[in-house]
Image (cartoon, rainbow, N blue to C red):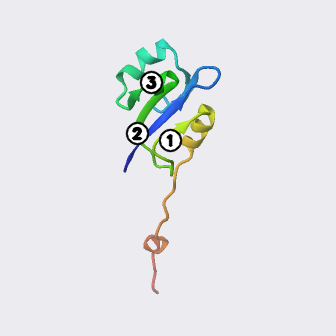
């Protein structure tokens, strides 16, 4: 799987989507110190406009993936891809 750079820009209330916490958070000094500073996904401050993170994203998104609406990003990340299954391999045949 390929890692994607996510550029999470702050919304008007200073909030961003945090993949580590899987929630929308206020990007303040408390968040940066408690979570961003120790996060292996952390990749920068997005030019002072938010936070950049790098992680494997299963969704078909661009690289970099620019996020302007943290709540839409949260919702989008809750959807899990279900891969097609070969249904014949799950069947049992009984003879009689």
* Comes first in the chain, label 1 or label 2: 2
Q: Where is residue 47 in the image (x, y as percent from the top left)?
A: 47, 25
The residue identified by callout 1 is 65
Q: Are marks 1 and 2 in contact (CB under 8 Å)?
A: no
Q: Where is residue 86 in the image (x, y as percent from the top left)?
A: 46, 70
Residue 67: name its quadrant.
top right
Q: How crowded is mark 3: few (under 14 residues within 10 Å), some or many (20 or more)?
A: some
Q: In this rendering, would 51 be left or right of 24?
A: left
Distance of label 1 from label 3 (alpha carbons): 15 Å
Q: In this rendering, would 59 be left or right of 42?
A: right
Please give the count of numbered marks on the rendered protein. 3
Q: Is mark 2 on a helix, strand or loop?
A: strand
Distance of label 1 from label 2 (alpha carbons): 11 Å
Give the residue drawn at x 62%, y 33%.
71
Q: Position of residue 63 (x, y in %)?
A: 45, 45
- Disc 2 vs disc 3: which is toward the camera? 3
Q: Which residue lies furthest to the top in this view?
A: 29
Q: Do the residues labelled 1 and 3 touch (CB within 8 Å)?
A: no
Q: In this rendering, would 75 be left or right of 5?
A: right
Mark on residue 45? 3
The residue identified by callout 2 is 55
* Comes first in the chain, label 1 or label 3: 3
Q: Where is residue 39 in the image (x, y as percent from the top left)?
A: 37, 26
Which of the two residues, 5 or 95, is positioned nearer the viewer here?
5
* Comes first in the chain, label 2 or label 3: 3
- Disc 1 vs disc 2: which is toward the camera? 1
Q: Residue furthest bottom?
A: 96
Which of the two residues, 57 or 5, is positioned nearer the viewer here?
5
């Amino acid at each position: 799987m390929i890692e994607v750079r996510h550029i999470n820009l702050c919304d008007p209330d200073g909030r961003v989507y945090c993949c580590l916490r899987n929630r929308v958070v206020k990007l303040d000094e408390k968040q940066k110190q408690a979570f961003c500073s120790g996060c292996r996904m952390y990749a920068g401050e997005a030019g002072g406009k938010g936070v950049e993170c790098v992680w494997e994203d299963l969704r078909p998104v661009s690289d970099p993936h620019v996020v302007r609406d943290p709540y839409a990003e949260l919702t989008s990340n809750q959807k899990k891809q279900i891969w097609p299954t070969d249904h014949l391999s799950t069947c049992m045949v009984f003879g009689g």
